[in-house]
Amino acid sequence: MRSQKVTFDNGKGQLLEGRLDFPADRLPHNYAIFAHCFTCGKDFSAARNISRSLASEGFGVLRFDFTGLNKSEGDFSNTNFTTNVEDISAAAKYLKENYKAPSLLAGHSLGGAAVLFAGSQIDSVKAVTTIGAPSNPAHVQKQLGGAIDVIKQEGEAKVTLANRPFTFKKQFIDDLASMSCVNAAKELRGKALLIFHSPQDATVNIKNAEEIYLSAHHPKSFVTLDGSEHLLIDKKNAAYVGQVIAGWAARYISMPIEEEIKTVHQVVASLHDEDVYTTEMKLGKHYLKADEPESVGGHDFGPTPYELVSAGLSACTAITIQMYARRKGWKIDNVEVHTDYGKEYVKDCETCEESIKKIDVFNRSIKIEATDLSEKQISRIMQIADKCPVHKTLTTDTRVVTTLM
């Protein structure tokens, strides 16, 4: 995944810092904004992993620190839930002016509550996703504990959250009290809503998801995150959320036609240092991951490079056989191609200096399901299998021409 640092004005002269995550070819089909959880930040694991998962499905994803948090400018004590919503709108304006207006908003916990409000205010947004969001933003007061009384009596108090001190003022509490995600969900008329929540969420009870869902108009969907905790620390849970969002959102956002995407190469692979061996790929207009097994240090999130090569041979063989059969008017109900790759010691050629050497071998087995084919026809089909284009490429002299971009 490619990621670059960006900064943009929050509308009050303060610069907010974000990361813009791109798909492998840096040509997103749509842009999205991800809003992080309460006092977290753009680099919190859930924000990073969900954004990366969305980027691997072709989205450009902007995740940023709200005003006064981490590397964004501003005084946190002067912020509140309303300023969070305003920050999301500022992020949308930045994308519109520099890339493309966002069509998708996603938010985690209080960030999920914020995107419900921002969703109805940003015209370009067609789909909104909440993850473990409270139905009432005032829910976060629970995290302030006994400091609430001090804030109400003295006007402000310092609270330590996740080992960091934050100053909260009374205006923060008053602002939360005036907000309702139930009402905000009703205002999303015509925009799709997807709600994620875990039944085991001990921070925000799943009852909150029910209240948001019941108040929203269709189209709306709910996906349970069974077994997950509130912060989505587990990378696999976060990746799952991103994958589901991408598949769901495709029904509601506009996907550019192939001619509108100026691809330079047929296949692009991109590997960031932090991802170890998990490689994001774009094949034509399709997205895929490649990886290595855990036994060699990978995450096993996708097929290995040699499995991809074997897949190309298997797919090409099956397609070639069915193409030939259709031209001949033969009916093949199904063709299966099983391929294994390895290196074996075999007799390569009689005239080689080393007649016995280790060469690449693709072991291919073909299963044909057909009721009306003769043995002669099946024999011919097996001959045609050896004529599939990928087979020819693998068994003839091939050059790889490498240039530095």
Image: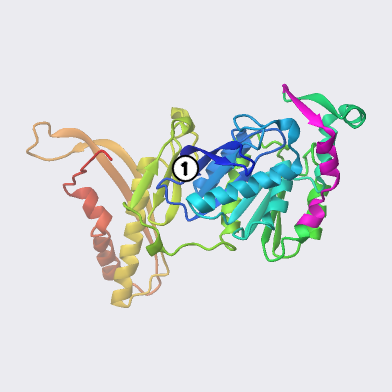
Asked which quadrant contains residue 358, the reply is top left
236 w.r.t. 394: above or below: above
Q: Amino acid at mark 1?
A: Gly
Front-most of residues 21 and 85 = 85
Residue 215 visible (yes or no): yes
Give residue 362's position: percent from left, percent from top. 30, 45
How packed mark 1 is, by other alpha carbons closer than 10 Å (few <14, some 14-19, many 20 or more), is: some
Give residue 200's position: percent from left, percent from top. 77, 40
Front-most of residues 14 and 400 = 14
Give residue 132's position: percent from left, percent from top. 73, 44
89 w.r.t. 373: above or below: above
Q: Name which residue lies at 50% across and 42% down.
A: 21
- With 162 as the anchor, is 149 left or right in this view? right
37 w.r.t. 375: above or below: above
Quadrant where the C terminus is found in the figure: top left
Q: Is residue 317 magenta?
A: no
SS at mark 1?
Answer: loop
Q: Name which residue lies at 58% across and 41% down.
A: 9
Q: Residue furthest front?
A: 13
Q: Residue furthest bottom?
A: 329
Residue 109 visible (yes or no): no
Q: Which residues are magenta?
A: 163-184
Asked which quadrant contains residue 74, the reply is top right
Give residue 13's position: percent from left, percent from top. 61, 39
Asked which quadrant contains residue 368, the reply is bottom left
Give the labeled residue for mark 1: 302
Q: Is residue 183 magenta?
A: yes
